[in-house]
Image: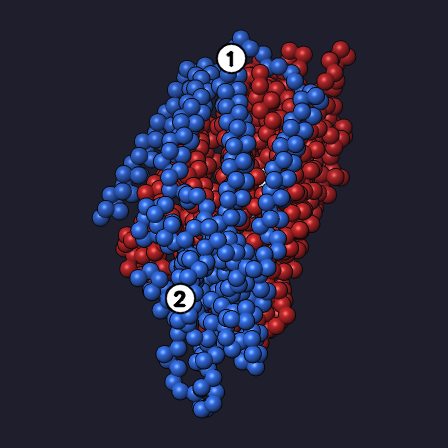
Chain colours: A red, B blue
Amino acid sequence: MSESMSVHPEVVTTHDVHHDEHGGGHHKETFISKYIFSMDHKTIGKQFLITGIIWAIVGGLFSVLFRLQLGYPDQSFPILETFFGHWAKGGQIQPEFYYALVTMHGTVLVFFVLTAGLSGTFANILIPLQIGARDMASPMLNMLSYWFFFLASVIMMSSLFIQTGPAAGGWTIYPPLSALGQASQGSKLGMDLWLVSMAMFIVSSLLGGLNYISTILNMRTKGMSMTRMPLTIWAMFFTAVLGVLSFPVLLSGAILLLFDRNLGTSFFLSDIVVNGEVLPNEGGSAILFQHLFWFLGHPEVYIILLPAMGMVSEIMSVNSRKPIFGYMAMLGSLFAIAILAFLVWAHHMFVTGLNPFLGSIFVLLTLLIAVPSAIKVFNWLTTLWRGNIRFTPAMLFAIGFVSLFISGGLTGIFLGNSTIDIHLHDTMFVVAHFHIVMGVASFFGMFAGVYHWFPKMFGRYLNSTLGYIHFWVTMVGAYLIFWPMHYEGLAGMPRRYLDKSGWVSFNQFGDLDKMITVVSIIVFAVQLMFVFNFFYSIFKGRKVTTQNPWGANTLEWTTPIRPGHGNWVGEIPEVHRWPYDYGKDGRDFIPQTEPIGANESKH
Amino acid sequence: MQTVFIVAILALGFLVTFQIAKASEYVAILRGEERSRKQTNKINGFLLLVFLIAGLIGVYYCNEQLKGKILGAPASDHGVLVDRMLYITLALTFIVFVITQVALFWFSYKYQESDTRKAFYYPHNNKLEVIWTVIPAITLTVLVGFGIFYWFKITGEAPKDAMQVEVVGSQFKWEYRYPGADKVFGKKYFKEISDAKNNPLGQLWDDPANHDDIYVSGEPMHLVVNKPVKLIIGAKDVIHDVGLAHFRMKMDAVPGTPTTMWFTPTKTTADMKKETKNPDFVYEISCDQMCGKGHWSMRGEIVVETQEEFDAWLAKKDPQYAKVAPAKKMEPAKDSATAPGILKDSVIAQVIK
Ligand code: HEM
Ligand SMILES: [Cu+2]
Ligand SMILES: [Cu+2]
């Protein structure tokens, strides 16, 4: 690495060092403007990351709690009563509490961690740095994007502490359950707060998304044509497009639901008698909401996954010391996934009474998505093939990501086939599927990104021994938890059943559920260790001493070790090539800033 | 006390790990970062290989442990189709699974960093990329083909001679209605629903078709073996779902929008008791759609029996109208506490026993 470092030691200083307006910290920065109401994309990215980490701890803790119930339904844990009072009467998690936990777990992890925490963090940090821009198109809107997210967080968090508890109808909040306070505790004030919080969240994500798109389209440095962008940026771009086009639909659904709840409208309500009380609503459609929800909901799963895919592609190429295989195919498949993501939503609704013919169209479109997914997998495999691989913690997480994506993608082929989905819909099989392919896989992408770009964010390294422990325990744990869960689903065991002992058909998995619970607690503990590593290393980690520690081609490694607001001292470097010239013509790597040599071979 | 103990042990373990991790960083610096990085690289490469092998063994072991616990042979004609589709998909995806996972971990292990190798500059190969676009596309077309063929069979029109049963879900119970001798369900209107007036389903008594309809609750639904049945599914309050794991069937129960599904049960409950060697076997209806705090306990039962047994069972039932008609004549109605089907809150306790 060090000898390759010397190939072009002075990438930055080759430009004349005249301090332009943004070069140094020319205007005085106070603590508030630097760390709190900051407009620096890097700081905003870190704000998203740290808020995301806090939410992840909360969401993860919830899962440990409800796993206790699932693994040990008969046991009493007095400590729970100490903390949660009547929600855990006699040390036993009450059904309302259980459902509140599950709902918040899903909401928090899907939206607050894997959407805001993931694309908020890496789109912010990487887009300007990798396309060669001083900041986002609108730093102001960017800052607002974080603060709307913060507001959404405060509202959601506050809903945990009200008397009737937070929303409890599942993260998909289907009405009428979510519309009728009489039907469930969680559909009282908690549900209103959920909807308002999500509305704020959507505003945040729109502000962010529009900004990411306009930055990528308009602010690339000289020579950075679209097809010279790293795949991370392409992934962030499609992610933002998906979000901008689909989140407004959820917003409309949320607003209509608020109307139904509070203003007596009947968008989603019809023919209802709840607890003996006849409601006046007629003519609404409960299924309409599901269309609105899944029109966002399915793109949402790709909003979560695409950034991870982009980062994995980049990290895999850097650490294999080889170009990503099939750049154009990778890009094309991202594009195909982004388009198809809008055309498959009803595969979540095969058994809602959907017209069977319509169902068959959605089967076709859904299984089509497996084709670009397969292309991506094969290209990653070929990227590894005949590489010279360095197993940094980031690289291990990237490899783990591919493994999980394969496993979870393949079970998608079961579910996308409506015939099989009749049996598997709303069973533990679905839970296993999406946790592997979306939950854990995207977390792996996020971890890979954190380990890889931590030196850029904080000028220090994460401790890699802890990183290796983190990876191996999480990898083994994820499979132990979710692989056997498919079998529960194959037996038909429904989701969201907190005690199966009353059932003849589903009570045969007691030992399995115990095992899963124990493993989840271990895995959770190891995540806490990661969090510790994260905060410890910000202050005490080993210092980064070279500008380009991984020997990477992309532009972020041409900035100073601790870049200030404006990123580059002096002029922004010009780009002359694509970002994946690793191992070309016998050279370990050739940064994007290096002009094409006279007798360089073509690719 | 125990908790404190566990927390202390965890904290201690954590501290030790952390110290080791910190020390290993110093050692690395002392010994030369380059060298120690290469050493850890070897270890991780080896572990990836171990993970692959242990993982594949684990997959096998897991299957051995659990394959007996997932449902046995399907108990309906449609279930046979669902299972066949499932096994076709399983076979294909399992092959792909093994090939790709082996490639992933094997390549990682084989091509780990070494001083003697240079990475191979290989940015793309159009032929390869076309191949692995076309092969998945063809495979998936086959799966879609089978899938849609079965799907239309399952969701197509029910046979004319199918018996009909209405299923109504509400928090947290199932109620049923049989159309009686005229084989026609009388009309309903949700505002008529009233347990107090002995009208739990909101039947309109002006409709004569209602007069012979039989209402059943608090006991299993009865079906006839080898006779197609069409379920007409509804809900009173929130969305529920009629999940029939043994028949491999499932359909949402949506307030305001009736849904249907049909199938032919092929094994009586008695058959299944023998087949599963479980004297307690019953067909269960599970609610598969989150419907509130009692969702996990919203259980119904089905008895599949011969036509004779079924007829005998049905003959003992009076139409719901019989309970209302005398009351209609001698208004005001008497106390109706004895009416069946008023379970409400007690139902959870009752189901779990
Ligand atoms: C080969 C590709 C895939 C196919 C064919 C597929 C198919 C499906 C289908 C049909 C369902 C609905 C199952 C049901 O509820 O009965 C489903 C559920 C789900 N999938 Fe996938 N999927 C694929 C990949 C993915 C990916 C890549 C993600 C996320 C990044 C994902 C996330 C989810 C989630 C979150 C759910 C469950 C939602 C819920 O009910 O709470 N899937 N998938
Ligand atoms: Cu989907
Ligand atoms: Cu339910």
Residue located 42% across and 31% down the image: B59
| Of the pair A353 and B301, the residue shown nearer to us | B301
Q: Is residue A496 left or right of residue A264?
A: left
The answer to whether residue A417 shows anywhere in this view is: yes
The location of residue A574, given as percent across then percent down, is: 74, 27
Amino acid on which the number 2 mark rests in the picture: Ala
Q: Work out how far the residue at label 1 is from the one at label 2, CA to CA, in angstroms.
A: 80 Å
> Which disc, if any, is residue A148?
none
Is the residue marked by circle 2 packed among few (<14), some (14-19), or many (20+) residues within 10 Å?
A: few
The answer to whether residue A19 shows anywhere in this view is: no
- Quadrant where the C terminus of chain B sits is bottom left
Residue located 51% across and 37% down the image: B87
Q: Is residue A54 above or below residue A541?
A: below
Q: Is residue B35 above or below residue A16?
A: above
The location of residue A205, given as percent across then percent down, is: 63, 50
Closest to the camera, between mark 1 and mark 2, is: 2
Label 2 sits on residue: B312
Determine the residue located farthest toward the top in the rendered image: B116
Label 1 sits on residue: B114
Whether label 2 lies within 8 Å of ligand 3 gets the answer no
Q: Of label 1 and label 2, which has the lower sequence position?
A: 1
Q: Chain of mark 2?
A: B
Q: Secondary structure at mark 2?
A: helix
Q: Is residue A541 left or right of residue A571?
A: left
Residue located 71% across and 38% down the image: A216
| Of the pair A325 and A149, the residue shown nearer to us | A325
The location of residue B51, given as percent across then percent down, is: 43, 26
The location of residue A127, given as percent across then percent down, is: 65, 37
